[in-house]
Image (spheres, rainbow, N blue to C red):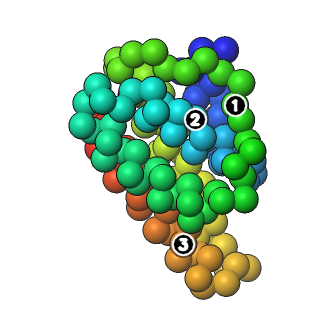
Amino acid sequence: MNYAEAAREIAARLARGGDDVVAAGAIQMAIEAWKCLAGTDLAWDRFGLELLDVRARLYSDHDDVLVDADVPVRDDAETRLAVTALLEQLARHHDRLASDDQSDLARRLSHDAGAQQLRRAVAALA
C-alpha cells in the first residue's frame, strides 16, 4: 500500500474511534514521513520536533508498532495532504482522550498538550 493510501486508512480508523495501537501507527507514519523528507524543506524540521516530543510523552509504550506501507518518496501536495489529514485526525483523537472524565487530570492535560503540538506540526507544513 502506498503512503497516502495507508495514511487515509489510519485516519479513517481514528475517526471511527481507533484505539491506542491505531494512534501509535499514525504517529509512526508521520515520523517516517519526517525521516524521509527532512532536508527538503525546513518545515519538516519544525514538524519533526513536535512529533518527537509527542511520541516520547504519549507513545513510549508503543515503540514496536509498525505500519506496512511504502515510505513517502517526495515532498509533494499529495504527501503533505495525507500527513496533515492524518495528524489532524490524531489531534481529534487526543482531544477526545483529554475530555475523558475517567482519566486523571495529569493524563488529560498530557493529551490536550499532545493535540496542540500535533496541530502545530500540521501548521508547520501548511
Callout 2: helix, strand or loop? helix
User: Which residue is located at x 49 percent, y 20 percent?
Assistant: 72
Q: Are marks 2 and 3 in contact (CB under 8 Å)?
A: no
Q: Earlier in the sequence, mark 3 or mark 1?
A: 1
Q: CA distance from mark 2 to mark 3?
A: 21 Å
The quadrant in which the N terminus is found is top right
Q: Earlier in the sequence, mark 2 or mark 1?
A: 2
User: Is residue 122 at all visible to an observer of this figure?
Assistant: yes
Q: Amino acid at mark 3?
A: Ser
Q: Of 33 and 11, which appears nearest the observer?
A: 33
Q: Which residue is mark 2?
A: 29
Q: CA distance from mark 3 to mark 1?
A: 25 Å
Which marked residue is nearer to the observer: mark 3 or mark 1? 1
Callout 1: helix, strand or loop? loop
Q: Are marks 2 and 1 in contact (CB under 8 Å)?
A: yes
Q: Position of residue 107 (x, y in %)?
A: 62, 76
Q: Which mark is residue 67?
A: 1
Disc 3 crowd rating (10 Å Cα; few below 14, some 14-19, many 20+) is some
Q: Which residue is mark 3?
A: 110
Q: CA distance from mark 2 to mark 1?
A: 7 Å
User: Which residue is located at x 38 percent, y 51 percent?
Assistant: 49
User: Which residue is located at x 70 percent, y 79 percent?
Assistant: 103
Q: Of 122 and 29, which appears nearest the observer?
A: 29
Callout 3: helix, strand or loop? helix
Of all residues shown, which one is farthest toward the left? Answer: 42
Q: Position of residue 73 (x, y in %)?
A: 45, 15
Q: Earlier in the sequence, mark 2 or mark 3?
A: 2
User: Which residue is located at x 57 percent, y 45 percent?
Assistant: 27
User: Is residue 95 at all visible to an observer of this figure?
Assistant: no
